[in-house]
Amino acid sequence: MAEDDAEKKASSGLVKKLLIFGGGGLLLVAIGVAAGWLIFGSSQPDPSEEIEEIIERKMQEREAAEMEADNATPQKQSKDTPEEEVFETIYHEFPGTFTTNLSGSRKMLQVGIGVSTQYDDTVMMNVESHQLALRSVILGVISDFTEDDVKGATGRDKLAVALRDSINAKLEALENFGGVEEVHFTSFVLQ
C-alpha cells in the first residue's frame, strides 16, 4: 500500500507538472494571439486613405502659400503678341567652297555661300537645278572685287549684294524669276 501511495503521489505530481506547463504554454499562446490582434488586427487605416489625406493636406498648404504670395507680390501679366503675317525663310547652301583670285591682287578669296528666300520652294529648286551656271556667275562676280573691296563687314555686305543681284539676274534669264533675297557667307577666308 505504501507503494501505491508513493505511485499515486508520483503520478499526481507528474500530472500537476504537465497541467502547469501545458496550461502555462496555452496561456502564453493566448496572450500572444490577443496582443497580436490588438496591435495588428484592430482597425488599421487603409493605406490609400492615408495617401489621400497627405495629398489633401499638401494641396491645402500649397493653396495657402499661393494666397500669401498673391498678397505679397503683384501677379505677372503677359502681353498679347501682335498678330503679324510671318513668312518662313528657306535656305540653300552651295556645296563646297568658291575659290578665286581677287582683281589686281595676288591674294585669293575662298568663301562658302548660302542663299535664302521667303518665296516658295520653287526658288530653291531653280537654284539647285541651275547650280552649274550660278557657280560660274558667283566666281565671276568675286573675281571682279579687289582686296580692299572685300575687307571688313561693309566690304562683305557689298559682295553679298553684288552676288545676290547677279544670281537673280541669271535666274531671271533662265526661269523668268529670281527670288533670292539674301546671300550668306558660311565661310570667308582671304589668303
Image (tube, helix red, strand yellow):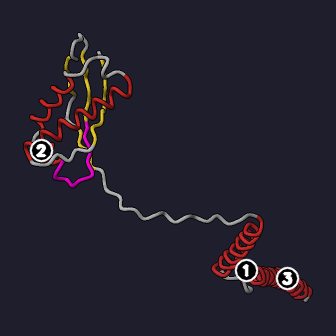
Image coordinates for residue 52, horizontal then vertical, percent: 65, 79
* Residue under pointer 2: 172
Disc 1 marks a residue whose amino acid type is: Phe
Distance Cα–Cα, label 1 vs label 2: 90 Å
Instruction: Please identify the residue farthest to the left as the structure is shown.
Output: 174
Residue 120 part of the magenta segment: yes
Disc 2 marks a residue whose amino acid type is: Glu
Q: Secondary structure at mark 2?
A: helix
Q: Which mark is residue 20?
A: 3
Distance Cα–Cα, label 1 vs label 3: 29 Å
* Residue under pointer 1: 40
Q: Is residue 26 above or below residue 147?
A: below
Quadrant occupied by the N terminus:
bottom right
Q: Secondary structure at mark 3?
A: helix
- Of tags 1 and 2, the one toward the viewer is 2
The residue at the point 30 percent across, 50 percent down is: 89
Q: Earlier in the sequence, mark 3 or mark 2?
A: 3
Q: Quadrant of residue 96?
A: top left
Q: Is residue 80 above or below residue 150?
A: below
Q: Residues within 10 Å of mark 2 (few under 14, many from 20)?
A: few
Q: Quadrant of residue 139?
A: top left
Please state the extent of the stretch shown in magenta in the rendering. Answer: 114-123
Image coordinates for residue 30, horizontal then vertical, percent: 78, 84
Distance Cα–Cα, label 3 vs label 2: 118 Å
Does residue 179 show up? yes
